[in-house]
Amino acid sequence: MRKLFGLLILGILLTATADVVAQSKRRIIQLSGFVSDSVNVLPGVHIYVPKAGRGTSTSPAGFFSMPVLEGDSVVISSIGFHRQHYIVPAKAPDNLTIVIEMVSDVTYLKEVQIMPFPTEEVFKEAVLALNIPMDNGIDQKNINAELIALMIKTTPMDGAANYKYYMDQWSTSAADRFQPRTNPFLNPFNWARFIRDLKQNKK
């Protein structure tokens, strides 16, 4: 029993060693290429060898480059496209360039009609049975044009209006910073208008 078990372990070790030796004899090939659909290049497409556990993704220009071995089965997959396979040929050159065209994977679903009621007659009966108030709940006094105009004049500025006013003042001051500053209290025309307005108000 022990001899049989030892022969079994020896056979497994020899098989694994033979696989390693066989893989070491396979040439390393630099596989490069472009992936596209019928119109444009495809970025972010996954290019990988499942058995070896190595892979890469295409660049924004649809280009990829990765080392592979002779006979490797390369999988090309992307969401929305059919998965493709490429087997590296045995007598491929050391630098192999390929162009892969992906095919769209489109699934058409059947049309679905969503209705809250089984038939149109039942829907009409339910609508007629509703007791909907015709009043929209808006007080007509609040729609008075004079009241709205008064509110527009007396309502203070909100945050956006204050910000706009500040930015206008800042841009004006930046444009006029090299201009001479005038004092409105020293302008005789302003005093003349002020005295005229006072006389008109007294009358």
Image (tube, rainbow, N blue to C red):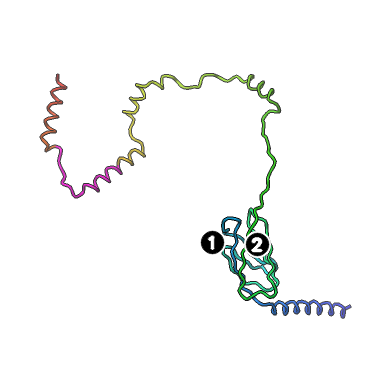
> Tag 2, which secondary structure?
strand
Q: Which residues are magenta?
A: 166-184
Where is the C terminus found, in terms of image quarters? top left
Percent x, y for residue 157?
33, 35
35 relative position to 201: left or right: right
Tell me if residue 161 comes above or below residue 9 in the rendering. above
Question: Is 124 or 103 nearer to us in this picture?
Answer: 103
> What numbered label is drawn on residue 126?
none
Q: Residues within 10 Å of mark 1 (few under 14, many from 20)?
A: some
**Residue 199 found in image quarter:** top left
Q: Using the image, tell me which numbered label, if any, was put on residue 61.
A: 1
- Residue 100: image x %, image y %? 63, 62
Q: For the residue marked with disc 2, what is the amino acid?
A: Ile
Dot 1: element: loop
Question: Around disc 2, counting alpha carbons within 10 Å, would you say few (fewer than 14), some (14 to 19), or many (20 or more)?
Answer: many
Distance between the Cα atoms at labels 1 and 2?
16 Å
Tell me which residue sits at (27%, 43%) in the image. 169
Q: Quadrant of residue 144?
A: top left
Q: Residue at x 87, y 80 (%)?
A: 3
Q: Position of residue 152 (x, y in %)?
A: 34, 28
Where does label 2 land, which residue?
Answer: 76
Q: Is residue 172 magenta?
A: yes
Q: Quadrant of the N terminus?
A: bottom right
Q: Is residue 59 magenta?
A: no
Q: Amino acid at mark 1?
A: Ala
With respect to residue 134, does 8 lie above or below?
A: below
